[in-house]
Image (cartoon, grey):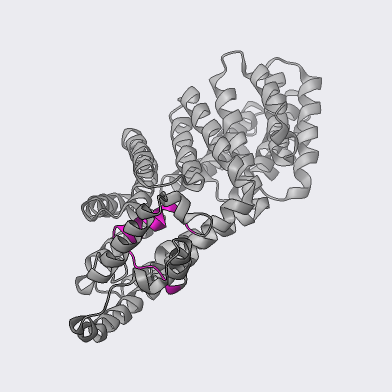
Amino acid sequence: MSAEQSPGKIGKTVGENLRAARIAQNYTQGQLASPDFSVSYISAIERGQIHPSLRALEILAARLGLSSTQLLPSRTNSDKKAAHTTSQVEREDEEIDIPFLEIQLYIERGDAQQALTLLNKISPKRLKRLHQLRYNYLRGRIYQALGQLQESEHILSEAREMAKEMNERQLQLRIVYALAHTYMQLHNYPQALLAFQHCQYILEMLEGSDPYWQMMISTGAGQHYLSINAFPYAKTEFLAAIEHISSLSSPDALQAYYAQESQQLSENKQYDLAILYANKSLFIHDLAQAAQQRSLLYHNLALALFKRADGTEGEQLEQMFASESVQQDVLTLASLSAHKALWHLKRQELNEAENNAYRAYLQVQPHGDSIIAAFVLTTLGRIEYTLARYDEADNYFTSGLEMLKRLHEYATFADEAVYYAQLLEGRNKTHEALIYFRQAFESGQQANL
């Protein structure tokens, strides 16, 4: 562990003093924390896991009617002699924290090869235990991004056990979440589900509620259930994710919370967590991005309803249209309109199908490339084929498929390309059909990397 995270003598004494003063004033951790800090931050100080910044110490002391010096331990001669050694350790920690941060940023930007190049310059044998854990987590994520899934699974599994032994729950959560997605890419669905459930368990162990992670875990579990055609379970998870993201769409208080967490973590030199919380704050601040995420959740929910095909999907789509949040979200409306068009198409109600599909088309036009826009285009292609308007159908299908390529949505492209190839084959366009069958096969392989 780094000096800030180690339960050292000074940290423990400050924590003990803070806890004693809080109890004497009959304050709960939440009352002492609000509105400047999180409960988890106060708890970590009291347990001696981190040492608060001077600014934080002054605020907490004032809240308890004390001076900041009353919370500090008296420095002994041995403490003073150790100061030089401690500062040297801190400098060494910073020297490794900075490249780790750079590697993480390359992973987030999608440049896994550059991340691997930088990581290979670091010798893991010279690292402290916490840095070895972060090293393994980053290596596991890099291999996942590069499609080396067996290596990713092995490294992340070992990192998970290491994080558990060290009681590093924040990092353990990220490791298990990455491992869940590696299992999904390996089509090891039972292990993927167990990993998502483990994420939920870890989150419950962490103090305080974190809607960002709740949304991410529910979304991952929903995608898992959708991939194995367990549509009722997928619906439940996507509805839960939508509920969590609804709180993210009212960003002021939550954005301030994540920004504060990021600042405190940075002050305590926990840089990897600091950048994670800064990203959360930016994610929430960008309402357009939050709205797009919500639209995708509704889109996946509609897919789950439609694929289940139990006869109630039309009624449930109508119920989703009635939601006030949906009425204010153009991309979600477009997705639901396109799904409703497919529902009418299945019932051979062609006028209603065409009207809903064109309504969806007009709704997505101003918003550029998106999974929903591509879905609308291929839906129009299906309807035009049914109406024997083949030139228009071909234009819609090719436009939708090209958009999926640009978005790197390989699995969806493969499914749509196979469907389109079958339509072409039915019109005796064998050469064109073979081209799309081949592209579907290649894209399917890419999706499995």
**The quadrant where residue 297 appears:** top right
Q: Is residue 315 left or right of residue 58?
A: right
Residue drawn at 55 percent across, 24 percent down: 307
Q: Whole-percent x and y of residue 379?
A: 69, 32
**The quadrant where residue 272 appears:** bottom left
Q: In the image shown, does 146 or 81 lie closer to the viewer?
A: 81
Q: Which residues are magenta?
A: 37-54
Q: Whole-percent x and y of residue 4?
A: 32, 69
Image quadrant where one finds the N terminus: bottom left
Count of numbered circles in the view:
0
Determine the residue located farthest toward the top in the rendered image.
Answer: 311
Task: Confirm whether residue 114 shows in the render.
Answer: no
Vertical comparison of 268 with 394: above or below: below
**The quadrant where residue 57 appears:** bottom left
Vertical comparison of 97 with 416: above or below: below
Residue drawn at 59 percent across, 49 percent down: 405
Q: In the image shown, does 63 or 46 lie closer to the viewer?
A: 63
Q: Is residue 268 left or right of residue 440?
A: left
Task: Confirm whether residue 95 shows in the render.
Answer: yes
Q: Whole-percent x and y of residue 202?
A: 34, 44
Q: Is residue 323 left or right of residue 409?
A: right
Q: Does the magenta run of residues contain 53?
A: yes
Residue drawn at 52 percent across, 33 percent down: 240
Q: Whole-percent x and y of residue 169?
A: 32, 51
Residue drawn at 53 percent across, 27 percent down: 235
Q: Does the magenta run of residues contain 306?
A: no
Q: In the image shown, does 21 or 321 lie closer to the viewer?
A: 21
